[in-house]
């Protein structure tokens, strides 16, 4: 019976070779294995395994011998197995070739002869059973190689410490740091440890397919980094992502979670949509062990490459912001005093300037037309990039004067009402490309409220609608402001 196949393994060829020529490792992949005995290290071993052919089951004692070992390319093996009344001979060969991206292509063939009772009773099942067992064996080999870590951490005698990575900080006899963890130990370092009375030391020993902590951190950081961000220097397995300018941080949270699921890789960021300043750290990548498998780093890079950058900065370019205040004529000066200073401070904090300020009466239906004209006047000819709308009475209904005036001017209301307190009576609308932010009464306060969350996103060019506003409910319960008529505490 002739069998052959090919398996692609996500590991370099030398690592695959070492696994396949290690009897203890490779025999653990054999279905039905009961025991293993090494007869001649690196050459011969004996295995006991149970095999079922339908209702017929047999336990084979098999002697295996390597005939040719051409590291790390080719190997041949001869196996002779016996069971009560039966025997089997196998001659197999494997060939390894380098694949793309540090993978290995393994081609194998096997010539199998079965004699005796089993051959006569279970002849019809022989082929299908052999294929099932070989498929299971090579799939197990692939999975074990791809998930196996060569990385080791633990104590070693000082005689074996040179060249290995120091696992813990070492304190000198004077109580001061003598050696810092993470450094490859030199002969001088080992001598120093001996002077300190050490006979052993904890070290890390990365495997051949591991990536050092600094290199891994930088590769993950590069993969996550989008426009407007830069990487800091790298040390102790950490690299920071910093803002290059004033802007709004954008985070693909779902893909960030998937990156953090990779063993040894951690990425902590500021909350999505946070306003950040030039040079501010927006995220930090930390590799926890001294080295991680190359496969884990590649997996994190693949997640990062699936779409737009996981982290990016939307720049807050300077804009002119218009302000329209609504209220009775007698209240106009008070409206200016109450709303203009805090709103101007917010606009300027985000890198823009407060431009034209109009005050419109809010008494009868004719004022709807006046407000529509004021909005159109500010939005026309690119005079402003955004309009703030505030007044002594906030918008309280979707058909209130302000929403009607916006639509009368040719605009559209994107969302009325927000799951944020203070700030439930928020209005977001658009007049052509110009966003209109209807600010609730809490905008008079300098405490953080819904305006601080929505204004920078609109200034950054995001077109916000109901889905974006509704998403603000998680974390939307903010500190109360004294300027509101009925603070939450009054409810008892």
Image (tube, grey):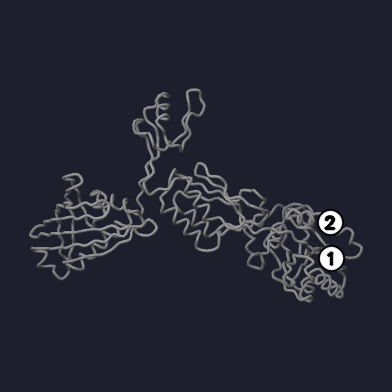
Which image quarter: residue 478?
bottom right
Q: Earlier in the sequence, mark 1 or mark 2?
A: 1
* Residue sitting at x 19%, y 44%: 41
Tell me the residue that label 1 is attached to: 326
Image x and y of residue 132, in percent: 24, 65
Q: How many numbered marks are there?
A: 2
Task: Locate the N terminus and report the quarter of the image it occupies.
Answer: bottom left
- Tell me the tag on residue 338: 2
Up/down of 413 relative to 239, above or below: below
Give the SS element for disc 2: helix
Q: Horizontally, is 198 left or right of 389 in the view?
A: left
Image x and y of residue 182, in percent: 46, 38
Q: Horizontally, is 35 left or right of 272 in the view?
A: left
* Residue sitting at x 77%, y 67%: 395
- Tell me the tag on residue 413: none
Say which of 20 and 395 sits in front. 20
């Amino acid at each position: 019976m002739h069998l052959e196949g090919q398996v692609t393994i996500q590991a370099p060829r030398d690592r695959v070779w070492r696994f396949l020529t290690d009897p203890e490792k490779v025999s653990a992949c054999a279905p039905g294995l009961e025991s293993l005995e090494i007869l001649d290290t690196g050459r011969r071993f004996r295995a006991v395994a149970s095999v079922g052919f339908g209702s017929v089951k047999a336990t084979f004692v098999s002697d295996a011998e390597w005939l040719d070992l051409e590291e790390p390319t080719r190997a041949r093996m001869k196996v002779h197995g016996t069971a009560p009344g039966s025997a089997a001979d196998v001659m197999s060969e494997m060939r390894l070739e380098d694949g793309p991206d540090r993978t290995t292509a393994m081609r194998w063939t096997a010539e199998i002869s079965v004699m005796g009772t089993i051959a006569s009773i279970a002849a019809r099942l022989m082929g299908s059973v052999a294929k099932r067992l070989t498929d299971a064996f090579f799939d197990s080999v692939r999975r074990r190689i791809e998930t196996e870590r060569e990385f080791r951490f633990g104590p070693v005698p000082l005689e074996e410490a040179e060249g290995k990575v120091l696992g813990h900080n070492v304190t000198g006899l004077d109580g001061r740091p003598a050696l810092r963890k993470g450094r490859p130990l030199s002969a001088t370092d080992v001598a120093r440890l001996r002077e300190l009375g050490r006979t052993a030391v904890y070290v890390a020993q990365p495997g051949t397919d591991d990536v050092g902590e600094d290199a891994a951190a930088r590769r993950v950081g590069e993969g996550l980094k989008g426009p407007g961000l830069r990487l800091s220097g790298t040390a102790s397995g950490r690299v920071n992502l910093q803002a290059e300018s004033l802007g709004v941080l954008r985070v693909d949270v779902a893909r960030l979670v998937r990156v953090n699921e990779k063993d040894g890789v951690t990425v902590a960021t500021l909350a999505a949509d946070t306003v950040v300043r030039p040079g501010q750290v927006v995220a930090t990548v930390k590799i926890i062990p001294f080295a991680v498998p190359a496969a884990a780093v590649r997996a994190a890079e693949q997640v990062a490459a699936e779409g737009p950058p996981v982290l990016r900065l939307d720049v807050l370019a300077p804009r002119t912001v218009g302000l329209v205040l609504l209220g009775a004529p007698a209240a106009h000066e008070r409206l200016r005093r109450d709303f203009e200073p805090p709103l101007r401070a917010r606009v300027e904090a985000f890198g823009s300037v407060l431009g034209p300020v109009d005050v419109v009466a809010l008494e009868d239906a004719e004022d709807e037309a006046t407000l529509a004209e004021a909005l159109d006047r500010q939005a026309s000819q690119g005079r402003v990039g955004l309009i703030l709308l505030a007044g002594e009475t906030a918008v309280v209904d979707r058909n209130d004067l302000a929403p009607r005036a916006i639509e009368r001017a040719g605009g559209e209301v994107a969302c009325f009402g927000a799951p944020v307190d203070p700030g439930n009576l928020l209005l977001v609308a658009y007049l052509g490309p110009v966003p209109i932010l209807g600010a609730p009464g809490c905008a008079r306060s300098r405490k953080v409220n819904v305006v601080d969350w929505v204004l920078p996103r609109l200034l950054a060019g995001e077109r916000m609608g109901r889905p974006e506003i509704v998403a603000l409910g998680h974390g939307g319960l903010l500190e109360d402001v004294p300027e509101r008529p009925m603070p939450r505490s009054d409810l008892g």
